[in-house]
Structure formats: C-alpha cells, structure tokens
Image (cartoon, rainbow, N blue to C red):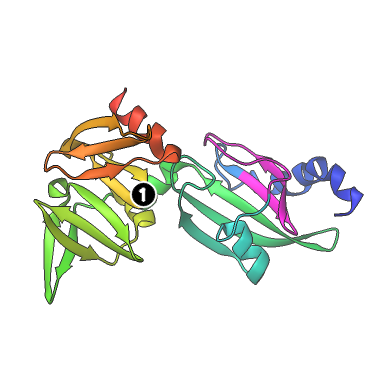
Amino acid sequence: MNNEFNSLPKDISQQFISMLKDWVPANSSIAIAAESSYIYFHSGHQNINLEVGQQVQSGSIAEQVLRTRKRTDAILDNSLFETPYYGIGYPINILDVPAALVVVLPSAFTEKKLEPFQFLTGRQEEEWNPVAIEKISHIESLQKKTWFYVEGEQFKTSITLKELQIRLPSSFIRIHRSYIVNIHFIKKMARDLTSNFIVTLKDGSELPVSQSYLNNLRNALEF
C-alpha cells in the first residue's frame, strides 16, 4: 500500500469523523478498511479485538462493502467484539483506493432495535410448536440448521444463532460457536481430561465451552 497511507489516521479523523459526529452516537465505534486491511479505527464503549494493519475478515461488514461496493448493514457474531453487534458499512474512496467505512452502533441501540424473543416456534416433522423461551434448555447449530431443546425434545427453527444471541434474554449465554445455553438449566461446570470446560445440564447433556466464549460464562455466573 502507498506510503501516503501512513498519514491517513489524521486525515481520516478530520475528513470522516467530523462528518459522522452529527448523527452517530458518541459511543459508537468506527473502522476504516482499504484494500485488505484496517487502516483506522476509533473505539467506542465496546471491547474491540481490532488493530490498525489487521487483515479484513471474510464475511465481515468491511469485507462485504469492499467486495460489493454497496452500503451494507447486518448483525454479526463476536469475531471482532465480545458480543454480537449491529454495524453499517459504506463504500468510500481514499487516495482513489476503494475503502470501507464501518460504524458499529452501541449495544443499547441494538437491544432497543430488536426486542427479546418471548417464545420460539419449533418444527417437528410437519408440526409447528410455539414454546415459551424460559422452557428452552439450550440451542444448537448443527449442519447449518438451528435446533432448540425442551425437556429432551428437539425442535428446528429457521432463526440463526447470530440473531438468537442478540434476541434472547440475558439468561441465555453463548458458550461455543455451536451452542447457546440457558443458565437456569446448568447443573455444573468442570474441566475435562484435556482441561477444556464442559457444561453439564440438569438432564445430563454435556456441552463444550470454547476458549473464546469462556468469559461470557464466567461473567454471567461469576466464577
């Protein structure tokens, strides 16, 4: 990338941030990517796993904007943040280089925008069953499909884990890229023979806890 990009953080803060401050909430996060890496970011209140020079991840809003050159908005998972986030990306040009300006709105905005689910409707063969959210013990993503469990029964839903993580009550915790658990159904947490955490539910089901989501569980249950 051209050496002129070395001075971009200052230029960007003047050119773009001043323009955004009139309509973007003060605690939003702002990132700019050009070519294949991030060249600027300003952190709001979120815990951000992003640095200048970091490669743009496949599937991220920045990657979608750079690829399509179109405005993109989406709820994405926690690949960059500790919780799912709602972001909006805009195609821009910097020194005639295609770039992406991404605004990540604070979680309070997302929670207000999307009310928590009160129930989920699950499918079993040719029947659809509405189930109160508090009766669900855990939710699983398997073979690109989403399943939730109630008293040992398995139901299929069309809602993805990404959206569920944003739309579920606070008693539901993401513990793995494939699992969300209702903490009211947890019997115990322990390490297995390989020192990985396992959550055991009251019905005996065992769910793995991945390292990237362990803090979610620790913060929720204070251990």
- Membership of 48 in magenta stretch: yes
Q: State left or right for residue 113 relative to residue 61.
A: left
Q: Is residue 98 above or below residue 165?
A: below
Please tell me whether mark 1 sits on a helix, a strand or a loop.
helix
Q: Residue furthest front?
A: 193
Residue 157 image point, x, y percent: 24, 64
Is 151 covered by the magenta stretch? no
Instruction: Report which residue position mark 1 lands on.
Output: 166
Q: Is residue 25 left or right of residue 188?
A: right
Side of 80 relative to 129 (left or right):
right
Q: Position of residue 27 (x, y in %)?
A: 55, 37
Residue 77 located left or right of residue 38: left
Q: Quadrant of residue 64?
A: bottom right
Q: Residue at x 51, y 42 (%)?
A: 81
Residue pictured at 62% horizontal, 41% vertical:
50
| Quadrant for the N terminus in the image | bottom right
Residue 79 image offset from top left, x and y in percent? 51, 48
User: At x 75% / y 42%, what residue is drawn?
Assistant: 13
Pick the front one: 154 or 165: 154
Task: Please say if 152 is above or below 212.
Answer: below
Give whichever of 118, 187 is nearer the camera: 187
| Bounds of the magenta segment | 30-54
Mark 1 Cα within 10 Å, few/some/many (few <14, many 20+)? many
Indicate the position of residue 219 as horizontal and vertical percent values.
36, 28
